[in-house]
């Protein structure tokens, strides 16, 4: 059977996370969850508008048009628009976003609505909200906008701001086509300076080659191309820019921008430049010397002072100034003057202000705070502040019905606020604020009190007997863990509290029992929920808990169910509870069950039915509880399984009569089912899944009222439930249950409420004496700033409360202390006897240990054998072993990591090296030489070298063939041939021409390029590879020599060791005690030692097995044999060492690794040296200089490679810049294509519209020309008169501008449509018959009126079309300018690319050559020496000398000409000065003549010149004027009294006339009756007249009418002639002035 139960929305309470706005001058509106709430600020009446599709996202309102708009939160959301106060849907805007709208805003006037969407499209869209059309849109990728605001003075302009960008958008129209154009306002840095932006154009500086090549862009140096290059800023130029958070327009279309850190910006409307007016810590320079080199736009700001500390998070502009507010909770008025910036603190809200906005008439300022308060502030009367909203903010814990739930309900918020609401209208009756965060709440059904559980483990009891002033009456500190569940049984006898760590406490719920705590039981798992059911048949209260075991995820639910009975007062006093307060499992009949499926919520009823919500499959399960006899477990039998919600997790709530089951989940829907059949009675969405769905549900006793709260939307909703009219049994059963329960609880409630009042009085007295009691506040108006959860004071206060709580003992701790005291008291004798025995045993063991120390070592016992506590000993041993295992494991893992790191380093730096790095040290001199460590070249590198070598061979053969074939030199004489040969030989010997200096060291590579031939990139790369090969060969040759020397040192060491044997024998024979020097190899010379651990390095004794001992013995024998062989006489090596120093040929390449040690005495000052030390120092200096010169020769090769690499880097930067310019060029070309298409389409539209406009103008002219044709049946004189009437238009009175208005933006002038409507209404008066000329037929007059209306409508259409055409032409002109600008940019980029190619070719031709200068032959002063050769060219000496001679001759000529020019220019300058002097004198005389001609002497000036005492004359005049004003006021009062008397007389006459009219109306009714009777008689008796007589009669009547009209016209003509005659007579009487005579003549 299908149920028809319904839920009707009664009221909604909560606060928004968005702005609070004004929809008209007296109504505020704000979104709350799925609802939009409207509050009348005068009557406090609330209206609710529900979003049927879910929660409300972005929201805005327009108080001028009285319309609201909000966006839904779902996929592909829509924007809904509603009129106010009708709340009728006007439009639905679709297809504007994919996921979410973040910002909405209406234009100040007009029909525009702007929206901005977030991820993934980031689109700004402009809508026509009246028609629902999408006019235009623009995508702004990755922009997280925070502010969107239209310009009140220009509906075609708006501002969009984010944390790093500020954009001003202009809406350009072309008939019905709209286009968005962007103006990017550059934001300054926090210090007031402007940020750095790189110009991609090729400047003149870039084309000039420097020593380091051409100057490239920073983005090109970074290797960036494309969009990243546009936004790239180098680290040295990066600055932290201001972050806009609020925007406000001014009447001049300027912008004020408030920033996050307190800066206030001003954006000029024309220049679009942002200037920092002032900031919280911005100091501006006062002197000229200290002014930094700032951009021009920031120089303006130094005239403004530092802004005092104030928040600018929200702004509003008025005629009084700029109002600002923010997180400090204060309202400021900033008045900006020419040289001063005044900040006035107007008012303080006590908490953080979210937004401020003015009403439509600018008479009041709406101030909305973060804490749920809203105020109306009157700027003219600062004391006039009215509270309009008082609902508070924060998430709800739960909401429940108070007592029997007939009048009030109670809600609790997590921040510690409890509120009492009226069920009838949702009025906030009172508020109670705690100093702690609330975690759970429960309302007692047997008395009017509320239990509030906190996260610190407290339970506070609040007395709500007097709902207007709730007060705390009792508190219990149960446990130090948060209390997550709090439940009363249906009769209000027990209160069950469940903690997060598994402790469940049972308490007496009656105030008369002082809320006594019975005891506790432990579940040993995290509790997810508690359910309490009353079994009236068995007269007990069953408690069910749901918990999750360790390892189970809390979000998925728990599988452990525990059920037990609550003990009453008698049982609690018995032995079923131990001294520590723990209830016996047997006494409470504690049983448990493990369910297969995890449940997030479980409730049960008195008939052993269990309902569970499974979040895995989002279904509701109904189980039957089967309890086993004499067992600690129970089983569940599944009866019904129904599919519930779309999202999980969810929870269940059972009504008190156990007939209805409510389920709620994260999808925001509430389902009410029949608990028996599990069929849905009703389902509705009251909260959104975006905010977490439902948080709590509660039923009234009669099930006709339902309360719900959201998880994170801060919304409390009250529903009215209506039962199905066809199913009256359920309705009767609910009413009977409600009546019976109410009668049962009413008597108990009266008794307990009296106790509550007494407890309140006692608690207040105790609170005055005890200062550590929790602070609370009861209010019906507002909450002070102490409740603010975000303030510093609140954090400090909570910390103080926690410190007090940490010192306070819990109920559980007190019970444990009492139990310990009782145990100590009962077992005091036994404990004393045990202590005495332990003391004696300790003494005995101590004596035994002393005796053990005196026995022999083999008979002595170990220390641990005297330990009598073997269990403790084993425990300590196990703990020690566990710690040792952990340490061993940690050490093994560390060793393993180090071994892996060692293997990686060894593989990379040792195994893969073809030549290992090592050092060769001298025996005594300290000179050390290192070899070159080398990796083996890969096959790829060798193949590349072969390829380059092959390529160079082909190039050389080709070049030689070209010289032989093409370049045939002319014949020369013998002397010239000899000179040429000498030059060629010199050129070949010149090392500057060759590509390398390695030939000096015996290595020659014929494939190297000459330095003057390196132009292209490929040539440079090939040269680098060839030079690297040469360096590799040099290192290889050096390593060969190094290895030979190293072997010689090994041989020498062996020879010395052989001689040391004989030396030791001699020393022993001579009986001398002298040490013999033994040469050894250091670790630097044998680096492989670092990879092995020697025996000498191990300090601990090593354990060796038999196999290891045998191996060591064999190794020792082999070593002795090697030493004997080494002692043999090697005469070849000995001869080489004695005669040639160990080498056959001395090489220079080992010099690079040589180091000459400095003498030891050089550490002391030079003035303390003796002659020998001075000589040694000079020798050391000469050797060091010679060694450094030799080293320089080897560094030159690497320097060449560095120079080539640098040139390659420059070429890479040139390529990057070229790619960026090509990217910009392609971007502009694509932009040109789009803009050209728009321009062509616009031209077509303009041409078509111009044709329509011309046709309409022609039709309008035809109407005027065809006027006489329309009145062909009227005489000519009358047609002329009708034409004048046809051209006549009513004079519309212009609306006077309000002089003293509070609105800074004024009132918009009426639009063309409004003016046309006013004109038509005025034309209706002109169309009246009283304006009809006499003797004019009515038909003709109606025809005239119709034609005139057509003419007016045609003129109106022409005006509208003309305005639209002008707008379209302007739009077309802008598109043409943009197209020209794009073409110019394309031209510029093309020129830049060409310039860059020239720079590249110039750089390739202008090579950097490394020259070898001879040292020691030419002395050059270091001061005058030129260190850079930026623009140098190698020329012959004769050319320079000839040029110098020519320059000298020309210089002498130039000096002579300059002297002559100087004398001539001196005369010219003197004549010019005299000429300018005469011109200035002439201008001065002309100005004087002009001033004299324009000078006028007024009567006031004449009086001032004539009167001696002008001030006395002015005073007399003022006194006369004051007397005249007084006389006029007296006369005005007299006239006003007369007018009032006349009004009274007229009112009396009006009353008399009304009475007469009533009499006349009565007579008129009687006359109507008589006339109707006579007409009836006449119709019955009258005969039909012939048609001819009727026509004749009609002609007579028409003739009579024409004569009457003619008479009227003649009378008017006579009156007009008389008036003209009178005027002519009057002209002869006055004396005419000269000017008037000239005018008339």
Image: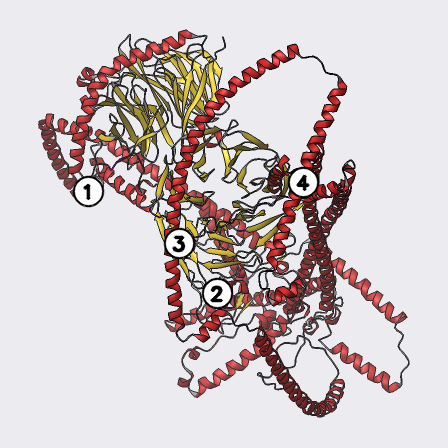
Name the residue: 68% across, 36% down: 1605
Which corner quadrant of the image does residue 1188 belong to? bottom right
| Callout 4: SS | helix
Asked if 478 appears above or below 597 in the picture, the reply is: below
Tell us which disc is closer to us: 1 or 3. 3
Distance from Cα at disc 1 to Cα at disc 3:
140 Å
Judged left or right of residue 790, residue 1223 is right
In the picture, the quarter occupied by the C terminus is: bottom right
Q: Is residue 777 magenta?
A: yes
Name the residue: 11% across, 25% down: 826
* Circle 3 residue: 1528
Mark 2 or mark 3: whose residue is earlier in sequence: 2
Mark 4 or mark 2: whose residue is earlier in sequence: 2
* Circle 4 residue: 1609
* Circle 1 residue: 856
The residue segment tinted magenta is: 775-780
The front one of 56 and 1490 is 1490
Q: Residues within 10 Å of mark 3 (few under 14, many from 20)?
A: few
**Residue 1527 percent coordinates (x, y):** 37, 55
| Callout 1: SS | loop
- Verify CB contact (< 8 Å) between mark 2 and mark 3: no
Asked if 599 appears above or below 190 in the picture, the reply is: above
Q: Is residue 1219 magenta?
A: no
- Verify CB contact (< 8 Å) between mark 4 and mark 3: no
Q: Residues within 10 Å of mark 2 (few under 14, many from 20)?
A: few
- Verify CB contact (< 8 Å) between mark 1 and mark 3: no
* Circle 2 residue: 1080
Mark 4 or mark 1: whose residue is earlier in sequence: 1
The front one of 489 and 1150 is 489
Distance from Cα at disc 4 to Cα at disc 1:
162 Å
Distance from Cα at disc 4 to Cα at disc 3:
45 Å
């Amino acid at each position: 059977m299908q149920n028809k139960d319904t839920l009707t929305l009664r009221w909604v309470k909560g606060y928004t996370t968005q702005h609070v706005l004004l929809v008209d001058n007296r109504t505020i509106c704000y979104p709350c969850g799925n609802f939009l709430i409207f509050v009348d600020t005068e009557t406090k009446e609330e209206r609710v508008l529900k979003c049927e599709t879910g929660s409300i996202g972005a929201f805005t309102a327009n108080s001028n048009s009285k319309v609201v708009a909000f966006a839904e939160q779902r996929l592909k959301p829509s924007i809904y628009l509603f009129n106010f106060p009708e709340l009728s849907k006007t439009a639905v805007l679709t297809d504007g976003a994919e996921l979410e709208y973040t910002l909405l805003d209406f234009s100040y006037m007009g029909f525009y609505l702007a929206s901005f969407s977030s991820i993934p499209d980031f689109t700004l869209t402009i809508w026509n909200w009246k028609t629902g059309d999408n006019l235009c849109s623009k995508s702004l990728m990755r922009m997280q906008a925070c502010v969107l605001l239209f310009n009140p003075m220009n509906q075609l302009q708006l501002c969009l701001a984010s944390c790093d960008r500020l954009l001003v958008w202009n809406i350009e129209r072309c008939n019905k086509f709209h286009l968005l154009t962007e103006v990017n306002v550059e934001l300054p840095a926090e210090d007031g300076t402007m940020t750095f932006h790189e110009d991609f154009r090729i400047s003149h500086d870039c084309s000039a080659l420097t020593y380091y090549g051409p100057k490239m862009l920073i983005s090109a140096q970074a290797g960036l191309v494309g969009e990243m290059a546009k936004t790239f800023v180098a680290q040295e130029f990066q600055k932290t820019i201001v972050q806009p958070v609020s925007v406000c327009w001014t009447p001049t279309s300027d912008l004020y921008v408030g920033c996050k850190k307190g800066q206030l910006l001003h954006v000029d409307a024309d220049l679009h430049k942002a200037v920092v007016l002032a900031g919280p810590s911005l100091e501006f320079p006062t002197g000229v010397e200290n002014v930094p080199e700032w951009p021009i736009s920031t120089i303006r700001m130094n005239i403004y002072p530092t802004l005092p500390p104030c928040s600018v998070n929200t702004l509003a502009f008025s005629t009084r100034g700029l109002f600002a507010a923010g997180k400090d909770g204060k309202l400021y008025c900033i008045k900006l003057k020419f040289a001063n910036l005044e900040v006035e603190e107007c008012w303080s809200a006590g908490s953080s202000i979210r937004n401020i906005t003015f009403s439509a008439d600018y008479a009041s300022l709406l101030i909305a705070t973060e804490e749920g308060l809203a105020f109306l502030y009157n700027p003219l009367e600062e004391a006039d502040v009215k509270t309009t909203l008082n609902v508070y903010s924060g998430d709800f814990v739960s909401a429940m019905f108070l007592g029997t739930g007939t009048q009030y309900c109670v809600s609790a918020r997590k921040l510690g606020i409890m509120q009492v609401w009226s069920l009838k209208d949702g009025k906030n009756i009172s508020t109670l604020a705690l100093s702690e965060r609330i975690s759970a709440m429960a309302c007692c059904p047997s008395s009017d009190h509320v239990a509030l559980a906190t996260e610190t483990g407290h339970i506070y009891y609040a007395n709500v007997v007097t709902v207007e002033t709730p007060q705390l009456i009792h508190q219990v500190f149960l446990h130090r863990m948060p209390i997550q569940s709090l439940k009363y049984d249906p009769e209000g006898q027990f209160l069950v509290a469940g903690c997060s760590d598994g402790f469940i406490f049972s308490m007496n719920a009656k105030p008369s029992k002082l809320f006594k705590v019975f005891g506790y039981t432990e579940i040993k798992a995290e509790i997810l929920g508690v359910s309490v059911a009353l079994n009236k048949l068995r007269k007990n209260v069953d408690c069910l808990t749901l918990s999750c075991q360790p390892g189970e995820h809390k979000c998925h639910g728990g599988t452990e169910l525990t059920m037990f009975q609550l003990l009453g007062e008698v049982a609690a006093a018995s032995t079923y509870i131990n001294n520590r307060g723990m209830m016996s499992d047997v006494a409470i009949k504690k049983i448990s069950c493990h369910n297969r499926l995890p449940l997030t919520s479980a409730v049960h009823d008195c008939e052993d039915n269990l309902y569970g919500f499974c979040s895995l499959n989002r279904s509701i399960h109904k189980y039957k509880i089967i309890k086993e006899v004499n067992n600690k477990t129970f089983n569940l039998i599944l009866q019904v399984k129904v599919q519930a919600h779309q999202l999980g997790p969810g929870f269940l709530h059972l009504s008190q009569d156990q007939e209805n089951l409510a389920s709620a989940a994260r999808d925001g829907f509430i389902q009410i089912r029949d608990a028996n059949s599990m069929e849905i009675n009703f389902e509705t969405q009251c909260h959104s899944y975006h905010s977490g769905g439902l948080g709590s549900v509660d039923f009234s006793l009669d099930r006709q009222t339902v309360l719900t709260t959201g998880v994170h939307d801060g919304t409390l909703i009250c529903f009215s439930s209506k039962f199905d009219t066809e199913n009256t049994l359920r309705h009767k059963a609910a009413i009977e249950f409600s009546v019976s329960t109410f009668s049962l609880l009413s008597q108990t409630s009266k008794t307990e409420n009296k106790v509550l009042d007494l407890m309140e009085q006692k608690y207040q007295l105790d609170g005055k004496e005890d200062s550590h009691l929790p602070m609370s506040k009861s209010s019906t108006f507002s909450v002070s700033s102490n409740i603010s959860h975000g303030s510093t004071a609140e954090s400090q206060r909570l910390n103080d409360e926690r410190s007090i709580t940490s010192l306070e003992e819990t109920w559980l701790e007190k019970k444990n202390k009492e139990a310990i005291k009782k145990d100590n008291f009962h077992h005091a004798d036994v404990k004393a006897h045990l202590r005495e025995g332990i003391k004696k045993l300790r003494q005995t063991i101590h004596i035994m240990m002393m005796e053990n120390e005196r026995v022999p070592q083999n008979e002595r016992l170990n220390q641990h054998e005297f330990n009598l506590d073997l269990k403790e000993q084993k425990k300590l041993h196990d703990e020690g072993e566990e710690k040792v295992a952990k340490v061993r494991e940690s050490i093994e893992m560390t060793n393993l990591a180090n071994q892996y790191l060692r293997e990686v380093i060894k593989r990379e730096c040792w195994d893969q090296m073809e030549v290992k790095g090592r050092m060769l040290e001298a025996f005594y001199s300290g000179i050390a030489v290192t070899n070159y460590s080398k990796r083996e070249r890969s096959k790829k590198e060798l193949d590349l070298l072969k390829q380059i070598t092959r390529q160079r061979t082909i190039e050389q053969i080709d070049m030689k063939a070209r010289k032989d074939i093409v370049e045939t030199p002319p014949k020369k004489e013998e002397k010239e041939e000899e000179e040429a040969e000498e030059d060629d030989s010199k050129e070949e010997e010149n090392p500057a021409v060759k590509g390398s200096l390695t030939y000096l060291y015996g290595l020659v590579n014929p494939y190297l390029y000459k330095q003057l031939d390196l132009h292209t990139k490929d040539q440079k790369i090939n040269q680098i590879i060839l030079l690297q090969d040469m360096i590799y060969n040099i290192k290889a040759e050096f390593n060969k020599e190094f290895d030979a020397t190293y072997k010689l040192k090994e041989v020498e060491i062996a020879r010395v060791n052989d001689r040391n044997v004989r030396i030791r024998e001699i020393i022993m024979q001579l009986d001398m005690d002298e040490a013999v020097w033994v040469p050894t190899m250091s670790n630097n010379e044998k680096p492989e030692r670092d990879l092995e651990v020697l025996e000498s390095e191990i300090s601990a004794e090593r354990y060796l097995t038999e196999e290891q001992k045998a191996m060591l013995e064999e190794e020792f024998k082999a070593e002795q044999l090697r030493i004997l062989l080494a002692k043999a006489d090697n005469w070849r090596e000995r001869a080489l060492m004695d005669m040639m120093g160990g080498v056959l040929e001395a090489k220079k390449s080992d010099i690079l690794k040589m180091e000459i040690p400095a003498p030891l005495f050089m550490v002391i000052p030079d003035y303390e040296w003796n002659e020998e030390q001075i000589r040694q120092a000079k020798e050391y200096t000469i050797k060091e200089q010679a060694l450094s010169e030799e080293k320089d020769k080897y560094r030159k090769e690497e320097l060449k490679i560095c120079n080539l690499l640098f040139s390659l880097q420059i070429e890479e930067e040139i390529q990057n810049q070229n790619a960026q310019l090509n990217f910009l060029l392609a971007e502009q070309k694509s932009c040109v294509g789009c803009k050209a298409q728009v321009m062509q389409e616009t031209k077509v539209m303009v041409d078509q519209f111009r044709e329509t406009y011309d046709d309409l103008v022609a039709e309008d002219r035809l109407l005027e020309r065809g006027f006489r044709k329309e009145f062909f049946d009227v005489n000519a004189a009358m047609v002329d008169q009708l034409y004048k009437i046809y051209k006549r238009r009513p004079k519309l009175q212009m609306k006077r501008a309000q002089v003293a208005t509070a609105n800074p933006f004024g009132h918009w002038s009426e639009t063309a449509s409004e003016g046309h409507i006013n004109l038509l209404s005025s034309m209706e008066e002109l169309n009246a018959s009283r304006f009809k000329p006499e003797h004019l037929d009515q038909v003709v007059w109606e025809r005239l009126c119709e034609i005139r209306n057509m003419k007016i409508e045609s003129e109106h259409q022409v005006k509208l079309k003309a305005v639209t055409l002008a707008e379209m032409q302007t739009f077309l002109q802008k598109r043409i300018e943009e197209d020209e600008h794009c073409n110019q940019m394309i031209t510029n980029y093309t020129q830049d690319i060409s310039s860059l190619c020239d720079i590249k070719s110039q750089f390739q031709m202008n090579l950097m050559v490394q020259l070898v200068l001879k040292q020691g032959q030419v002395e050059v002063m270091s001061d005058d020496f030129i260190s850079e050769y930026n623009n140098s060219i190698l020329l012959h000496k004769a050319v320079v000398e000839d040029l110098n001679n020519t320059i000298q001759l020309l210089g002498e000529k130039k000096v002579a000409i300059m002297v002559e020019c100087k004398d001539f220019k001196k005369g010219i300058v003197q004549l010019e000065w005299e000429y300018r002097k005469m011109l200035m004198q002439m201008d001065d005389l002309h100005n004087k003549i002009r001033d004299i001609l324009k000078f006028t002497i007024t009567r006031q000036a004449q009086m001032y010149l004539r009167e001696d005492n002008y001030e006395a004359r002015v005073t007399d005049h003022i006194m006369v004027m004051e007397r005249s004003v007084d006389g006029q006021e007296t006369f005005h009062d007299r006239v006003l009294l007369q007018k009032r008397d006349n009004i009274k007389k007229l009112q009396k006459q009006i009353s008399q006339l009304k009475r007469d009219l009533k009499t006349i109306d009565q007579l008129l009714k009687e006359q109507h009756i008589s006339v109707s009777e006579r007409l009836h008689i006449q119709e019955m008796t009258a005969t039909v007249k012939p048609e001819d007589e009727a026509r004749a009669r009609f002609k007579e009547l028409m003739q009579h009418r024409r004569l009457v009209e003619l008479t009227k016209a003649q009378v008017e003509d006579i009156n007009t002639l008389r008036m003209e005659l009178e005027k002519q007579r009057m002209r002869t009487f006055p004396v005419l002035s000269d000017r008037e005579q000239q005018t008339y003549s």
